[in-house]
Amino acid sequence: MATYSGPDDLSGTEFIETNFAGSVFREVDLSGVRIRGALFNGASLDGVIDGLRVNGVEVAPLVEAELDRLHPERTRLRPSTPDGVRIAWETVEAFWAPTMARAGSMPEQDVHRSVDGEWSFVQTLRHLVMVTDLWFGQAVLGRDRPYHPLGLPAAFVTNGADLGMDLAAEPSLAEVAAVRASRVAEVREFLATATQEDLDRVREPEVPSGWPSPAPRAASACLRVILNEEWAHHSFAVRDLDTMEDSKSAI
């Protein structure tokens, strides 16, 4: 498969009678794209969906409702009160616990394997360390240099090394799991005594430029970002672990 990457800007391009069958679009911006007369047989779409219409029907509310039906725990991840946030974090820890145990029972090379070009299990955990450092350590606690070296930023964060992350690191699952556990415990300890005032208070951290840029944010909004990231990346991790196990059983 040919690969096109880099700074090429194809915004505003019109593709006519172009064959994209079997293509993979990763970390692309499709905002405002209009597709007419297309075939989507067997297609798979993962991403942020807001305002997308298929044959005139807005898709996002339907997708969200079906995800809630299939995964009822999601409904606990939109809290607005201190007790609600504590329950949400307990939910996150509960769905990650068996997955961490499952990964821990696998050969080390498997948790470093990429499935279909996605992050490995270890890389996923590293990214969640970065997410917690950013949205909790930086945005809620206002830390000046919140990032652990083993954190892994998304592709669009291009200054990870400047922020203190070691992008060339190749840690073991045990090393990353230890850092991850410390971050999870820190959020749990904060929430144990958090009040409504703590959640509603707007933080204006004076931190170095990164992603997102420093801005006034309520702790509740920052925590909801973390909860969304936890659920999404857990679902990706489980999907890929299932794929690896299915491929082995088919041999």
Image (cartoon, rainbow, N blue to C red):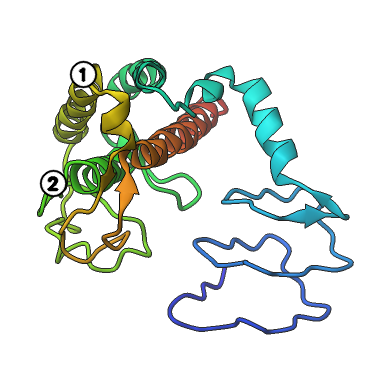
Question: From the image, which quarter does the N terminus lie in?
Answer: bottom right
Q: Nearer the viewer, residue 202 or 78?
A: 202
Instruction: Return the x and y of residue 179 as percentages of the image width and height.
Output: 15, 34
Q: Nearer the viewer, residue 136 or 114?
A: 136
Task: Name the element at disc 2.
Answer: loop
x 57%, y 51%: residue:
48
Q: How many C-alpha atoms fall within 10 Å of the one at disc 2: few (<14), some, or many (≥20)?
A: some
The Cα atoms of the two marked residues, 1 and 2, are separated by 25 Å
Q: Nearer the viewer, residue 129 or 214?
A: 214
Going by the numbered disc 2, the residue's amino acid type is His
Q: Closer to the observer: label 1 or label 2?
A: 1
What kind of element bears circle 1?
loop
Q: Which residue is mark 2?
A: 148
Q: Give the quadrant of residue 123.
A: top left
**Is 93 situated left or right of 52 in this image?**
left
The front one of 110 and 166 is 166
Q: Which mark is residue 193?
A: 1
Q: Would you place residue 158 above or below residue 99 in this image?
A: below
What percent of the width, then of the height, locates residue 22? 68, 60
Position of the C terminus, as image quadrant, is top right
For image coordinates 59% across by 22% down, the residue present is 71
Placement of 162 over or under 11, stated as above or below: above
Question: Residue at 72% of width from left, 55% of height from top?
Answer: 52
Q: Is residue 17 left or right of residue 48?
A: right
Q: Which mark is residue 117?
A: none
Q: If you read the primary sequence from the N terminus, does the residue marked by circle 1 or circle 2 appear first?
A: 2
